[in-house]
Image (tube, helix red, strand yellow):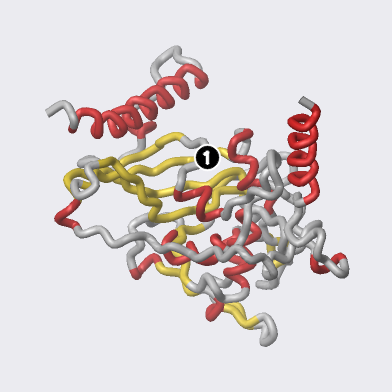
Amino acid sequence: MKKVFLLILLFFIANVSFGQANLLNAKNPSEIGDSSESKEVSEFLDYEYVDDKDILWSKVVYEFIDLNERLNFPLLFPVNDTKYDDTRKSLWRVIRENIENGKISEVYDSNNDNFTEASRIIGKDSTDLEAKVFKNYNISDIYKSKYVPESFVPREVASSADIFGYVIKGVWYFDKIHAELRYRLLAIQPYGKDLKTSVDGEETETGYFWIWYPSIREILDDHLVFNDKNNNNRISFDELLINRRFSSYIYKYDNVYGDREIRDYIRQRDNESYAQWQTRIVMESERIKKEILDFEIDMWGY
């Protein structure tokens, strides 16, 4: 019995000790969190090729990830963008920094989720901070940033604390080769405070821009999500998102009515409170989700 207890105790101590990458091997504090010396090789796996003829059925859905929900906290925190270096970052900080350094070079207007060329926004090429050249769509403009009066120079850009959620576009499809229902994330849009129109005491929320998700998967795969259960068992932002380890609700899906939103046909009734109206919208969202997930079960019924 004592041996079993000692083994359990040693296992627990080992997990605590290795809570941070390279903690025991660091010769100075700057090396803490550097996993480059790790023997474990993590290779990025791209989306597998799916032939259109192998898709028996599909449905495009739009969902909102509310960062106020506890399950989604790993995408939100830390909200202080200056407290940590590369070891801990919020999803927004990863996206913003990689837009600013040019690794994410193409984003699309928030008003068009079909990724047409007309809605394409040039990234780093549209602004030259050293030459103080700012065009209509500069980097900070797509963050909905504040400006100094009579100047195009940003005074404040959106931080992690200004982000309320993320809108995602994905497709559920039935793969007849594997005979199973699958999901593929196609696009993501940060949703947060509009610093241009928000005034003290009154905040305006808005979607910032669309990013085609497959184009940033490798970038997100390089950044790990904090795990408050076990620091030694962390996954990347890409793994979290493509495996749907978050809470969300459907607010729109592709339909014959021009892809109208649920609130466009589930309208507020006379003498109905706002809370009751929102409840009916959530119920419709859950109905659509159940309809999609039941498709695979129904396939086995034939």
Q: Residue at x 35, y 46 (%)?
A: 183
- Numbered-mark total: 1
Q: Residue at x 58, y 69 (%)?
A: 99
Query: Disc 1 designates what residue?
Result: 246
Instruction: Give the camera-side residue of 101 and 300.
Output: 300
Q: Quadrant of the C terminus?
A: top left
In front: 104, or 56?
56
Q: Is residue 221 above or below residue 153?
A: above
Query: Is 280 placed above or below 153 here?
Result: above
- 195 vs 243, left or right, is right
Camera sees residue 79: yes
Residue displayed at 55% across by 48% down: 191
Q: Foreground: 150 or 263?
A: 263
Q: Is residue 274 left or right of residue 92?
A: left
Badge 1 element: loop
Residue 34 location, quadrant: bottom right
**What's the residue type where badge 1 is placed?**
Phe
Residue projecting furthest to the top: 271
Residue 214 occupies which quadrant of the picture?
Answer: bottom left
Which of the 4 image quadrants contains residue 180? top left
Furthest residue toward right = 28
- Residue 215 falls left or right of residue 150: left
Question: Visible in this render: residue 197?
Answer: no
Percent position of residue 260, x then y: 31, 40
Q: Position of residue 83 (x, y in %)?
A: 81, 57
Residue 282, compared with residue 184, is above or below; it is: above
> Measured from the top left, where is residue 97 in percent x and y?
64, 67
Depth order, front residue of 282/41: 41
Check the picture and name the quadrant holding the N terminus. top right
Q: Residues within 10 Å of mark 1 (few under 14, many from 20)?
A: some
Q: Position of residue 49 (x, y in %)?
A: 28, 62
Most extreme residue toward the bottom is 131
